[in-house]
Structure formats: structure tokens, C-alpha cells
Amino acid sequence: MKKYIDGFMRYRYLLKELVIKGIKLKYRRSYLGLIWTLLEPLLTSMVLAFVFGNMLQRGGDVKSDMPFTLYILAGRLIYSCFASCTKISMRSIRANQAMIKKVYVPKYLYPMSTVLYNYVLFLLSLIVLVIMMVFFTVTDKTYTAVINLNSLQIFIPLLILFIGCVGAGLMLSTVCVFFRDLEYLWDVILMLIMYCSGVFYFVTEKMGMAHSLIKFNPLYCVISNVRTIIAGKSIFTSFDLYAGYSELKMMVYALGLSVISLVVGVFMFKKHQDNFILHI
């Protein structure tokens, strides 16, 4: 273990440079730059809230303690983070094949750096969530943003999300080297994950079997934890506001799966990394 820690510390500056490079390349030749990190989830959430809240009348099906736009925004931010981290990390080995062939660098730095820079952008995008909480506190008499000690619990689901993204990124980057069709297949899987994460609808008992299945989606568990904290409640004592599941159980379940994915991802990557050079 000490060997791997020393190796990581030796290349931590390279990891930092890869993260900075990723952020710069993402917004290269973009006039809005990092501002788009705030605008994109906000505009997308407004469109989804209009479509599902007004046109399809989904926002009024269940009594909510937060505006439907804010409800969607929280789910959208979490899902977008997972989707962007996994999609880009999946291609990280192939995207850096020129450097891999010329210079020795621990290969795990490539998927790790892509997850890190996308996660940093996600953390920046949380600013818009705070802004919208304040906005709806001023404009919506039925909602008041609650900032208390429970708000500090937000770091727990965010940490679980990061662990899950790293684990999934390592697994996907390994498999994608040998099975490139995974890039196209993963887009379909991400769509399925989005529809099973309760991003733009309330999870209720009226959904039948889907109501029971969605709780096994760890991403939904993270989203539900974040929404509960936004509502000013504790994830240690509360239940899912709409589905009726224990927030604590969902937190432990999501944490367990995230840690398992990280362990499996590290094992897969370490076992197959020496063969990457033969397939890129």
C-alpha cells in the first residue's frame, strides 16, 4: 500500500495539470466559458419543469415542500455529474494513447483526472442551486430555503457520488479499451439510468413495481439524500419525501455500492493496465 501512496504523491502535480488541462479544453473557444457550467443545468431544469410541470401536469401530482424547478435542478445536477464523469473517463485511455506510448505515467491518472475535473465543474454548478434556493425563497411564499446544521450533511451524498464516479470510471475505462462498442452502449444505459433516477418526476406508490425497483438505483438514493438536505431535514432521521424510504438506509446502500464499485474498478484496472498498450 505504501508503494502506491508514494507513487501517487510523486505524480500528484501531473494529476493537477491534467485536471487543469481538462477544464481548459472543455471550454476552449467558448465565449461563456465556466459561466456555461451554471447556465446549462439551470436552462435544462427550466425546460424540464415547463414540460413536465405545466404541459404534462406532473409537478402537481404530489405535494412537494420545494418548487418543482428546484426539485428537478437538484436531480439534474447529480445525474449530469455522473454522466459526464463516466462518459469522459471511459475514453480517457484511448484519448491519451500518444502519451501512454511515449512516456511512462501511471495510467490510472487519466481516468482519475477526467473524473476530478468534471467533479470540480459539478461543485461549481452547485452555486446555481444555492442561487435558485434564494430566488424561490423571495418569489415563492410556499417555500423557504432552510440553512441549518443539517445542511452540512450535503458532503456525505456528494462524497458517495464521487466514490461511485471514480469506481465506475475505472471500470468503464478498462472495458472500453478492449470493447470499444461500449461507448455507444453506455449512452443507452445512461438514458435508462436517468429515467430510473426520478430526475423530473416524483417516485410514488402509484408507480407499482417501478416504485420498488427505483430504490435500488444508487444514483436515485444520492439524489433523494440531496433533496432532503435542501429541504432542511436530516438524512439520518428522515424518510424519502415522496417514496417513503428511509434516507439513512438509502445512504448506506449507495455508499456500499460505491465502495464496491471502487474496489472492483481498482482491481480491474490494475489487472489489465499492462495490456492497454496492445489495444490502443
Image: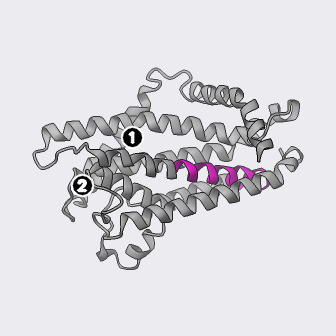
Few, some or many residues within 10 Å of mark 2 (<14, 14–19, 20+): some
Residue 92, located in which quarter of the rendered image? top right
Q: Is residue 41 magenta?
A: no
Which of the marked residues, 2 or 1, is nearer the chain's N terminus?
1
Q: Residue at x 57, y 34 (%)?
A: 117
Residue 269 position, x and y percent, is 76, 52
Q: Nearer the viewer, residue 249 or 119?
A: 249
Which of discs 2 and 1 lies nearer the camera? The answer is: 1
Q: Mark 2 falls on what kind of element?
A: helix
Q: Residue at x 82, y 53 (%)?
A: 272
Residue 182 position, x and y percent, is 68, 56
Q: Residue at x 74, y 52 (%)?
A: 174
Q: Disc 1 marks which residue?
A: 41
Which amino acid type is shown beneath numbered disc 1? Pro
Residue 126, located in which quarter of the rendered image? top left
Q: Residue at x 60, y 58 (%)?
A: 259
Few, some or many residues within 10 Å of mark 1 (<14, 14–19, 20+): many
Which amino acid type is shown beneath numbered disc 2? Gly
Residue 79 appears in the figure: yes
Q: Nearer the viewer, residue 60 or 57?
A: 60
Q: Nearer the viewer, residue 142 or 96?
A: 142
Q: Nearer the viewer, residue 146 or 47?
A: 146
Residue sitting at the far left: 141
Left/right of residue 270 with respect to residue 46 in the rendered view: right
Q: Mark 1 falls on what kind of element?
A: helix
Left/right of residue 101 with respect to residue 197 in the rendered view: right
Q: Disc 2 marks which residue?
A: 53
Number of labelled discs?
Answer: 2
Residue range of the region highlighted in magenta in the rendering: 161-181
In three-dimensional space, the C-alpha distance between marks 2 and 1, rounded to whole angstroms, equals 17 Å
Left/right of residue 169 with respect to residue 162 in the rendered view: right
55 up-or-down from 205: above or below: above
